Image: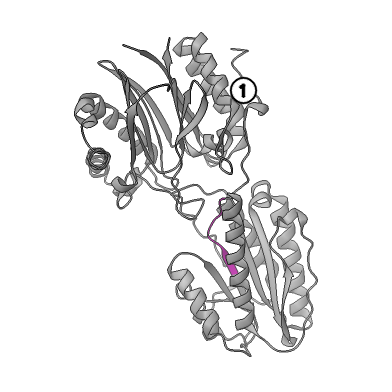
Amino acid sequence: MSNLELFDEDLLDNPSARVPVCLVLDTSYSMSGKPIDELNRGVKMFMEEVLADEMASLSAEIAIVTFGGGVRKEVEFASIEKQSVPYLTTSGNTPMGEAVNLALDMLEARKKTYASLGISYYQPWMVLMTDGAPTDDISLAARRTSDLIKNKKLTIFPIGIGDKAHMETLQQFSPNLPPVRLKGLHFKEFFMWLSQSITMKSRSTPGEDIKALPINPWADLSL
Amino acid sequence: MSRWKQASAYVAGRSHIKEDLPCQDRTICTEHEGMFMIALADGAGSAKRSDIGAEATLQTLTAYIGEHYDKLMAKDPGEISEELVGVALTRLTELAEEQEQSLGEFSSTLLFAAVKDKIYLAGHLGDGLIAVEKEEGLGTLSHPENGEYANSTYFTTSKDAASHLRIYKGELDEIQAFFLMSDGTAETMHRKQDDTLAPALKVISGWFDEHPVETLTDALHKNLENVIRQRTMDDCSMAIMKRMK
C-alpha cells in the first residue's frame, strides 16, 4: 500500500465559492453618539469573526455602503484578508434609495467578476440598517430588491434601529421577510449572528437548506 | 471481448463527521453478461434519507441498465433519459411510501458509465464530473450542471429531471478508462477555470495496471480519507473502470 498514495502535487485547487454580503448602513446625523459607536464596534467584530473562521474567511466577501449626507462606498468587495475595518462617522440626511441602488450595482458587478473568473458563488446577501426614514425616493431601489428576492437572486435583512426607524419603508424592500427591530443597540449580537450565518452558508452543499439561526439575541420581538 | 477492472469508494465529509451525519455519497460497480458498469450518486444535502435514496437509485438503475442495455442503446438520448428517470422515480416513490417520507428526502445526483464490446453509454444528472482517459491523455466527458449558485444542482427528484440527465453514447475508440467523481472529489481533481484534470487521475489509472481490485478499492478509500477529504468539507467518492490489455 505504501506506494499507492496521492500527494498534494497530484491534485488541483479551485477557489472557494464566494458569499457576497453588502452592508448598507445608515450614518445620518441621527445616528450620532452611542448608536454610531456601537455600530462601529459591531462592524469591527463582524469582520474579525469572519476572518477567524477557516471557511468563512475564504468564502465571505464584504462590501459596506453608508448613507448619511451623501452615499459612500466605505469598503469595496474583496477577500476579507485584504480589507481594513472602516471607521464610520455621521452626517446629514438619509439617502437610502441611492445607497441601496449603489449596493445592488456593486453586487451585480461582483457576480459578473466571479463568472468571468470561473468562481462559484452563493446567493448574495444585503443588510439594510436605518434608524429613521429615507430623505430620497426609494421606489426604484425597492422595486429592484423586490424583483431580485422574488427571483431568488437576493436575500435581504432589513433592520430598524430604535423607535423612529420607519419599518413600513423597510418592508418595501423585503416582500418575503418582515423587517426586524434591533433590540436596543445590540449591534454586536446582530453581527455575531450574521457572521455565524455566513459560516453556515459557506459550508452548505447542493440541496442543503440552511436553517436560520435564532434571532432573539439581537431582535426586539416584543411587538 | 475486453475486460474492464473496476473499483470505487466513498467517505463522509468533514462537515458530516462533525455533525455526526452519514456519508450521503454512494458508488457501485457491476458486471452483467459482458457489460461493465460503474455508477455514483451524491445524496442531496439536507434530504434526511438521501444516503438511502442514493443507494436505491444505484441498485435499481444498474440492474435495469444491465438487463436492458441493448434495447437502451437503440434509443435516442432523450428517450433513454426519460426511461431511466422513470425507473429511478418508481423505486424512490416506493421507498418514500414504505418509509412514510416525502419523495424529496431520497434525492441524489446520478453519474454512470457502462461499456459492452466497443460501445459505451454514460449518463450524468447534476453536479460531479465524468472524466475519461485516452491514449492522448485525460479529458472531461461531462461537466457539472449547477444552477446559478454554488449550492444548487439537479437531482433525481427535481422537476424535469429527465431533461437534465445528459446521455452520452458511442464508440469507445481510444477510451481506456472512465472516472466518476462527486463534487467533493472534483474540487481537487478538476480545475473549473481552465477545465484541467488533476495528474492524480493518471496516477490512479497506473495503479489499475498493477494491482488487484481489492488493493485498488482499499487504496481509493484511504486516499479519499487521508488526502482528498482534507481539502474539502464535502463527502468524497470515486468510481473508476479501466480496460485491461
Q: Nearer the viewer, residue B222 or A70?
A: A70
Q: Nearer the viewer, residue A65 or B120?
A: B120
Q: Residue at x 43, y 67 (%)?
A: A151
Magenta residue span: A120-126
Whole-percent x, y for residue B103 in the image: 29, 47
Picture quadrant of residue B90: top left
For residue A6, above or below residue B91: above
Residue bearing the label numbered 1 = A6
Judging from the image, mark 1 belongs to the subunit labelled A
Picture quadrant of residue B173: top left
Q: Residue at x 64, y 86 (%)?
A: A132
Where disc 1 sits, the SS reads loop
Q: Residue at x 62, y 13 (%)?
A: A3
Relative to B244, A90 lies left or right: right
Whether residue A150 is visible to the viewer of this picture, yes or no, is yes
Relative to B76, B216 lies left or right: right
The main secondary structure of the magenta stretch is loop
Q: Nearer the viewer, residue A43 or A17?
A: A17
Whether residue A178 is visible to the viewer of this picture, yes or no, is no
